[in-house]
Amino acid sequence: MKCPRLSYLEIEGAPFDAGRALGRFGAAALHEYARHSAAWASVMRYRGTLLADSMSRLVRLRFPRVWDELQGLAIGLERPFEEVFLWNCRGDLWAMAPDGDIAVNEDGCTTVQQAGTVRRITHNEDGDPAFAGHCAIAAFEVAGGAAFAAFIYPGSIAGHTFAVTDGGLAMTVNNLRCRRVRAGIPRMVLARALLDVARLDQALALIHGTERAGGFHLTLAHRDEPGLLSVEFSSEACAVVTIAGRGLHANHALHAPLRQLPQIITASSQHRQRRGQALLAEAAGKALDPLRVLADAEDAGFPILRADPLDSDAENTLATADIHVGSGHIEWQVHPHPAQPPQWHLRDGHFICKKDQGGQPV
């Protein structure tokens, strides 16, 4: 399997300037995507609605720095602000749609979690294959917030994929298809705001204290704090589980009370969860290579590594992050594919060196 390389991007300045630079990076890809994408068209149906206005007003009041990034993003993309804002609410809006009109191609992802002295978070970033070759690993230094590095999609703010901050926070994000959604803070906006917190307790307080719209699963760790957290949130509930040993999450709610609430569990999500748990069970008492788990394609119909253009959820694996959270430092690598050498090597929120597809420094 040959995977497109990820671009490298440095973004700095005030929130508006950072958003504008992010928009310029993704403008060509998003313009082409918007011309042909049914997903884009489904979100744009919410233009001019009271729902969109309510969510916009909440973001402007509650998270003004993210609001400024979104304003800059729209300028950089050369798209109307309302379109760009709605696109960054897409998961929340799809969850509000009627049962017969639900888009499922929203960043599915699979995450392997390993506790220990060095906590390890290994994550397949699954997204719309139309964006393959148009994504990036970006280093951000935004005034008033933490420096961080993150995987970014064209047209989207950072935070809803995987990221590590210079302040010591590591975060990976999986989609949850919760059905009870309200006109609250869009989940992508909340995830972006989490990258500016300094500690795990602050991250949890921000999640609990925010009027949330949709739902996400987060794996969280901090270089200066013990513990590896598996966090699920929706508009109705939040569950925090400390991982002891090993865990795996394949983008549907597993923790009480969220697993009892209405959600959509696609066949891919269900099969990846079962297969991943089986691989963890096989490795009980032995060393585990999470990259091998994430490269697994034993279930041909619903593999963990997703490369089929006709994937049942219209998602492909676009990158894999392997994050090692130790005491006082985070070392991590980004692979174009879990079975290929890393393309990027980072410490905390900074690049150490860039590598080519063969693993050689460039």
Image (cartoon, rainbow, N blue to C red):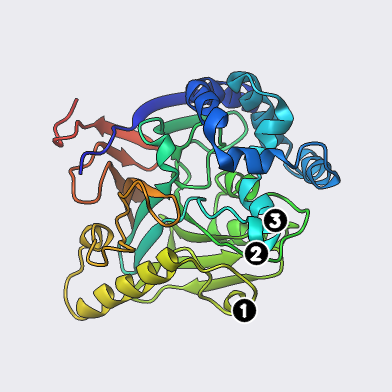
In the picture, measured across the screen, residue 235 lies left or right of residue 26, that is right
**Which residue corresponds to the image point at 22% horizontal and 66% vertical from the top-left?**
298
Q: Earlier in the sequence, mark 1 or mark 3?
A: 3
Viewport quadrant of the N terminus: top left
Residue 234 disc label: 2
Q: Give the amino acid at mark 2.
A: Ser
Q: Percent x, y for residue 307?
A: 30, 49
Give the amino acid type for the residue marked by disc 1 in the picture: Pro
Closer to us: 17 or 174: 174
Question: Spatial distance from mark 1 to mark 3, Cα to Cα?
Answer: 23 Å
What residue is rendered at 24% in x and 57% in y?
295
The amino acid type found where label 3 is placed reads Ala
Q: Position of residue 355 (x, y in %)?
A: 21, 32
- The numbered mark at residue 97 is 3
Query: Which residue matches tag 1?
Result: 257
Q: Secondary structure at mark 1?
A: loop
Q: In this view of the protein, can residue 227 be seen by the observer?
A: no
- When asked about the image quadrant of residue 279, the answer is bottom left
Q: Residue at x 57, y 25 (%)?
A: 18
Image-based side of 359 in relation to 251, left or right: left
Residue toward you, 13 or 319 = 319
Q: How many marks?
A: 3
Say which quarter of the image contains residue 182.
bottom right
